[in-house]
């Protein structure tokens, strides 16, 4: 049992210069700088072991309560790596989400909306249609060609973007994957 007092919990090496696993002194390394940015407290070596492995650490587990400096440095580097990876995955997730939004915008921009022409036509028709019955107005709207047909239901659309947006109702909002031939 006396040998455990001089043994590192991680590498099982013996040393006179061991640090307590429940001491949270600052080391002034990359992890300390990262923690200062996020205003997180300095972790103890026991916290580092818990965070970087699935093995539980407790004071009554009869394992050594000390760690050598080289192992502590590796644990601190591992936590810094883990934090950096988590931050980068979060960032990439946002980029991926923005890319989906951009694809939708590109589809909408590529659509031939001819808004200016429609407004002019409506203004011109407005004068004429004031005298026409409502049935003729409805008939003009029905006469527009609808070349974009949904493969999942009988609906058809005047533009590709409308079809794309509609098809997401069938796939619960997720864009369909298209196979490349």
Image (spheres, rainbow, N blue to C red):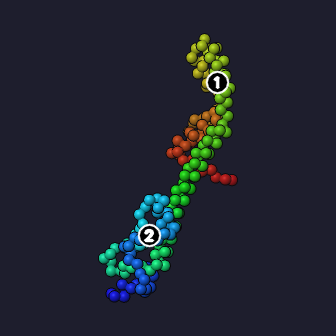
Q: List x then y, in percent, for residue 1.
A: 33, 87
Q: Which mark is residue 89?
A: none
Q: Residue at x 54, y 55 (%)?
A: 91
Q: Nearer the viewer, residue 90 or 65?
A: 65
Viewer-nearest of discs 2 and 1: 2
Does 11 sit left or right of 131 as displayed? left
Q: Are marks 2 and 1 in contact (CB under 8 Å)?
A: no
Secondary element type, mark 1: helix
Q: CA distance from mark 2 to mark 1?
A: 68 Å
Q: Residue at x 58, y 21 (%)?
A: 138
Up-down: is 31 above or below 130?
Answer: below
Q: Nearer the viewer, residue 141 or 27?
A: 27
Q: State whether residue 49 appears in this view.
A: yes
| Image label count | 2
**What is the crowding at mark 2: few (fewer than 14 residues within 10 Å), some, or many (at least 20)?**
few
Q: List x then y, in percent, for residue 20.
A: 38, 77
Q: Nearer the viewer, residue 105 or 21?
A: 21
Up-down: is 17 above or below 129?
Answer: below
Q: Residue at x 65, y 25 (%)?
A: 118
Q: State whether residue 176 appears in this view.
A: no
Q: Which mark is residue 26?
A: 2
Does 4 sit left or right of 119 as displayed? left
């Amino acid at each position: 049992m006396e040998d455990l007092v001089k043994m590192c919990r991680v590498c099982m090496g013996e040393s006179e210069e061991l640090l307590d696993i429940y001491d949270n002194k600052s080391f002034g390394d990359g992890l300390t700088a990262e923690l200062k940015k996020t205003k997180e407290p300095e972790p103890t070596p026991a916290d580092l072991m818990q965070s970087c492995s699935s093995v539980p650490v407790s004071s009554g587990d009869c394992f050594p309560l000390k760690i050598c400096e080289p192992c502590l440095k590796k644990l601190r580097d591992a936590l810094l790596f883990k934090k950096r990876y988590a931050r980068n995955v979060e960032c990439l997730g946002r980029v991926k989400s923005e890319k989906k939004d951009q694809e939708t915008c590109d589809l909408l921009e590529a659509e031939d909306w001819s808004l200016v022409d429609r407004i002019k036509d409506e203004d011109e028709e407005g004068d004429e249609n004031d005298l026409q019955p409502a049935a003729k107005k409805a008939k003009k709207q029905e006469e527009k060609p609808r070349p974009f047909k949904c493969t999942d239901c009988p609906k058809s659309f005047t533009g590709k973007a409308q079809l794309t947006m509609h098809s997401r109702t069938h796939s619960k909002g997720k864009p369909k994957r298209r196979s490349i031939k």
